[in-house]
Image: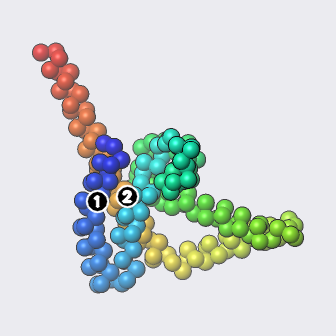
Amino acid sequence: MNADGHHDVNKAVALVVGVVTVSAGIGMGLHWLLLLPGYLFATFLCDPDRDQRRTIDWPHFYRPAEAWDIIWMPYAKNTSHRGPSHWPGWGALGRLMYLLRWVLIGAFLYGLWQNAGHLTGQIVFWMIRVILEETVRLAEVFAPVWLVFWLGMSVADTMHLGADLSSTNVKRAATKFKQERGRA
C-alpha cells in the first residue's frame, strides 16, 4: 500500500479519533484535546514511513514538503524500514526524540549566533547546560500534554501498521493465487 493508501485509512479513522478526543477532553481534562493533533501529526507529517529513503527534487527543495523530507534524510539513512520505527508507541517516541534533537541543535545554533562576538569554551558549555536544563524542565511541566500527544501519534501508528499488514497479506494472497493458477 502506498503512502496515500495509509493516509486514506488514517483519514477514515480521524473522525472517530476526533469524537473520542472531544468527549475525553470534556470529561477528563482539556489536555486530552491534544490527542487529535498528535494523531494528525503522525498521519501527515511524522508517519512511520519516514524511515524510507526519499528522492529530493533538488531544484525544488524550497517547497515545504521537500524541506521536511530533507530534515528526515539522516533518520531514513540510519533506520531500517519496518524496524522499530513501525512499532506502535516506540516508533512515535523515536520520531519525537529525533525531532527534539533538531530543536536542540537549532537552539544551540541560535545561542551561538547571539553570542558570536564573545564566544569562549565556558560560554558554549553554559549554553549547552541551560538548553538541556530548560528541556528537562519543560518536559516535566508539560508531561501530561506530551503523553497525550504521543498517545495520538501511537494510535495513528497502529492504524498505519494495520494498513501495512493488510496490504502485505493481500499481496501475498494475490501472488499465491497467481502461482497456483499458473500451475493448473
At a point 42% along the width and 43% down the height, the residue shown is 82
Secondary element type, mark 1: helix
* x then y, percent, for residue 154: 38, 61
Which quarter of the picture shows residue 101? bottom right
The N terminus sits in image quarter = top left
Residue 90 is at least partly visible in this image: no
| Residue farthest toward the front in the current orientation of the protein | 59
Q: Is residue 25 left or right of residue 117?
A: left
- Mark linked to residue 43: 2
Secondary element type, mark 2: helix
At a point 51% along the width and 54% down the height, the residue shown is 63
> Relative to the observer, which residue lies in front, 163 or 83?
163
Which quarter of the picture shows residue 36? bottom left
Q: Are marks 1 and 2 in contact (CB under 8 Å)?
A: yes
Residue at mark 1: 11
Does residue 159 lie above or below 129 as drawn? above
The C terminus sits in image quarter = top left
| Labels 1 and 2: the sequence-earlier one | 1
Callout 1, which amino acid?
Lys
Residue 104 is at least partly visible in this image: yes
| Residue farthest toward the top in the current orientation of the protein | 183
* x then y, percent, for residue 27: 29, 84
Neighbor class of circle 1 (other Cα within 10 Å; few <14, some 14-19, many 20+) is: some
- Mark linked to residue 119: none
> Relative to the observer, which residue lies in front, 89 or 2?
2
Which quarter of the picture shows residue 120? bottom right
* x then y, percent, for residue 171: 25, 34
Neighbor class of circle 2 (other Cα within 10 Å; few <14, some 14-19, many 20+) is: many
Does residue 184 lie above or below 61 as drawn? above
Callout 2, which amino acid?
Thr
Q: How many marks?
A: 2
